[in-house]
Image: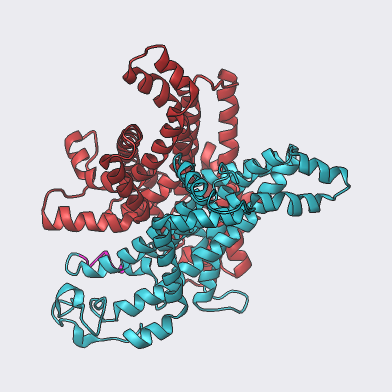
Chain colours: A cyan, B red
Amino acid sequence: MTAPLHEPGATETALADIAADLPAKAIEGRSPGRIAWLRLRRDKVALAGGTVVVLLILVAVFAPQIVGLLGHPPDQLHEDQIDPNLGTPIHAFGGISRHFLFGVEPVNGRDLFSRVVYGARVSLLVAFLAAVVAVLLGTLFGIVAGYFGGWVDALVSRVMDLLLAFPQLLFIIALVSVVPDSLWGFTGSGVRMAVLIVVIGFFGWPYVGRIVRGQTLALREREYVEAARSLGAGRGYILFRELLPNLIAPITVYTTLMIPTNILTEAALSFLGAGVKPPTPSWGQMLSAAVTVFQADPMFMIIPGLAIFVTVLAFNLFGDGVRDALDPKGSR
Amino acid sequence: MLAYIVRRLVAVVVMLLVVTLVTFGIFFLVPKLTGGDPAALFAGRQADPTAIAGIRRKLGLDAPVIVQYARFIWGLVAGRDYANGADVTHCAAPCFGYSFKTEQPVWPLLTDRFPVTFSLAVGACVLWLVVGVGTGVLSALRRGSLWDRTAMTAALAGVSLPIYFTGMLALAVFTYKLHWLTVSYVPFTQNPFAWARGLLLPWIVLAFLYAAMYARLTRATMLEILGEDYIRTARAKGLAEPVVIRRHALRATMTPVLTILGLDLGALVGGAILTETTFSLQGLGQAAVRAISDQDLPVILGVTLVAAFFVIAANLVVDLLYAVVDPRVRLT
C-alpha cells in the first residue's frame, strides 16, 4: 500500500482554473468543501470513476431485481448449456448469448451474469465495512497517540510497526479458518462476512493510524488548540471537536483509497478458500474455481477477473481525484 | 552504528516472540473460545477418547497454554523430547514440532520449501525495483509526454489487477497458447539458466503489480524533488544534467522508495502465497495454505515464523540502506 502522494501540477491547474473565473463574479466566500467539489467536478477521469462506483453500488443494492430482469437465479443449474463430454459451455465464448449475458459456468451451467452481480454485494459490503472499521480504529488510536505523545505514543507506534511488519495475508487466512461457521448462535455466510470485515479492518487500521498520528502531531501545536486549552476545554473536546474536523480531509482521502485495496484482499482470501462460503457467490471464489478449467474455458476466468479489475480501477480513479481535490496544499 | 545494530537485533528478537505469541494465541485461544480440540484434530476423525488423551499427553497439550508456549520456544532454541510414558521422540533444535497431518517434522519441510519462495521473492523484487524506478524516473523527466501518459495508464491498470488474474492470463497466453515458457522450479545450484527460465513468468506477474506502484511513487517524488532549490543550485553551478539527475535528484528519490520497500516486504509474503497458488509452485505459501485448510498448527506456526523472520530481517537491511542512500540520515 502506498501513501497518498501529492502530485504537483494538479493543484496549480485547479487553482488557475478557479482564479480564471474569479473576476467574472463578485468575490464570494468559498468553504474548503465547496472548493474541493468544484475541483472534483472539473476532473473528468475522476468523475468517470465515480460514476462507475455509483453504478456498482446500485448493482449491488438492486442485485435481486437486476438478476430477475436480465438473468437466472444464481444457483440454478443449466446443464443443457454444457457439453456433456467436455464439461465446457456448448456455445462459443463461454456460452455468452442473449439469455446468458456473461455466459455460463463450466460443468454445472450456472448463469455467470447473476453470479457476478451477486458477487458485487459481498465484495463491496466487505470492502466498505472493513474500511469503516479500519478508519474508526486508526483515527482513534492515531489521534490519541499524536495528541498525548509520551508512552501512549510509543506503545501505539510500536503496535502499528508490528502489525505492518506482519505477513498479513497469512495471519488473516489463519484467523478466518479457525473461526467456526456458527458463532454465538449465528450461522451461515453472515458469520464469515463479519469475520472478514473485522479481520481486514483490523489489519488496515495502522495505515490510517500513521497518517492521523502524523497530522495530529503537527496540529496540536497550533494556536487554536492552545486557545481552546486556555479556555478550559477538556481533552475530549479538543480531540474530537477541535482536532478531528481538521483531520477529515486526509481521512477521506485514505478511506477512498483503502476500499480498492480491501476489495483485492477480500478477493484474494476468497481465491485461497478463506472467503465467504459457497454457494454465496464471490469473485475471488469464481477465479479460484477457474484455475483448473481456464485452459479449456478462458471466459470463466476473464469474466470475474474483469469484474474485479473494473471495480478496483474505478475506485482508484475516483480516489485519486478526491485526493487531488482535497489537497491540503491548495488554499482558498 | 554498532550500538544501533545491536539494539535493532534485540528488537528483532522481541518482535519474533510477539509473532509466535500471537500465532500461538490464534490457534489455542480461538478454538478454546469457540469449542475445539487440537488433540482431536491430530488424532483424526474416528479416534477413541483414550487415543486422544495419549496424543494430548505426548504433545504436551494437557499443560497450560503458557507452559506449552514456553516449551515451544525452548524447542526452537535447544530441541525438545516428546514423551508419553516410555514412548519418547527427540526433536533436535531448531524444533518446530511435528505436522499434525503427516506426522513428519516441520523443520525439514520448511528448509525444503524455503528456496522456492525466496527465489520467487528476490527475483520479483529486483525486477520491480529496476522496472518501477526506471519507468518512474523516465516519466518524471519527460512529464506529459506520450511515454509518461502510456506508462502511468499502464501503472494504474497494474495496481488494479489481482496477481492471480494476471497470472492466469499470462499462463493462458504464454504457456498454453504460444508455448513460450513453462513454469517450474529448478534449484539455482542445479542449473541457473533453467532456474531463471522456469520462474520468469511468476517473476513478471508478481513484479508487475509492485512495479506499477513504484513507478507512480518514483514519478511523484522525483517531480517534487526536481522543483527543490538545491537542484536549481546544482544546475546553476554548471553541473551536467545527467550528474544532477543521478547524484542529486535520484538519490533523494530513493529514500521514500526504500521506506515503502520495507513496508511492502510484509505484503510480498502475501503476494508470494497467491503467485505460488496460481502457478502451482511448491513454496512456503502453498505449504501454509494447505496447512491452514488442514488446521495443521505446527506447520502454520513454522511458516509464519520463517516469513516474519525474513520480513523483519529485510526491514533491518532497508533501514541500514537508508544511511547509505541518504547522507542526511544518521543511525544512532
Residue B280 magenta-drawn?
no
Q: Nearer the viewer, residue A196 or B62?
A: A196
Give the percent coordinates (x, y) of residue A266. Answer: 44, 62
> In the rendered view of the protein, which quadrant contains the N terminus of chain B?
top right
Q: Residue furthest right?
A: A232
Give the percent coordinates (x, y) of residue B331. Answer: 57, 22
Instruction: State the residue at coordinates (19%, 82%).
Output: A82
Q: Quadrant of residue B45?
A: bottom left
In magenta, the rendered stretch is A288-294
Instruction: State the residue at coordinates (67%, 38%).
Output: A218
Left or right of A108 on screen, residue A149: right
Give the percent coordinates (x, y) of residue A50. Answer: 44, 63
Q: Nearer the viewer, residue A309 or A5?
A: A5
Q: Is residue A79 above or below residue A50?
A: below
Q: Quadrant of residue B238?
A: top left
Left or right of A139 on screen, residue B144: left
Instruction: State the residue at coordinates (37%, 65%).
Output: A284
Q: Is residue B147 visible?
A: yes
Left or right of A195 on screen, residue A117: left
Q: Is residue B320 above or below residue B82?
A: above
Residue A293 magenta-drawn?
yes
Q: How many marks?
A: 0
Q: Is residue A244 above or below residue A218?
A: below
Q: Is residue B46 visible?
A: no
Left or right of B65 on screen, residue B155: left
> In the rendered view of the protein, which quadrant contains the C terminus of chain B?
top right
Give the percent coordinates (x, y) of residue B48. Answer: 50, 72
Q: Nearer the viewer, residue A286 or A141?
A: A141
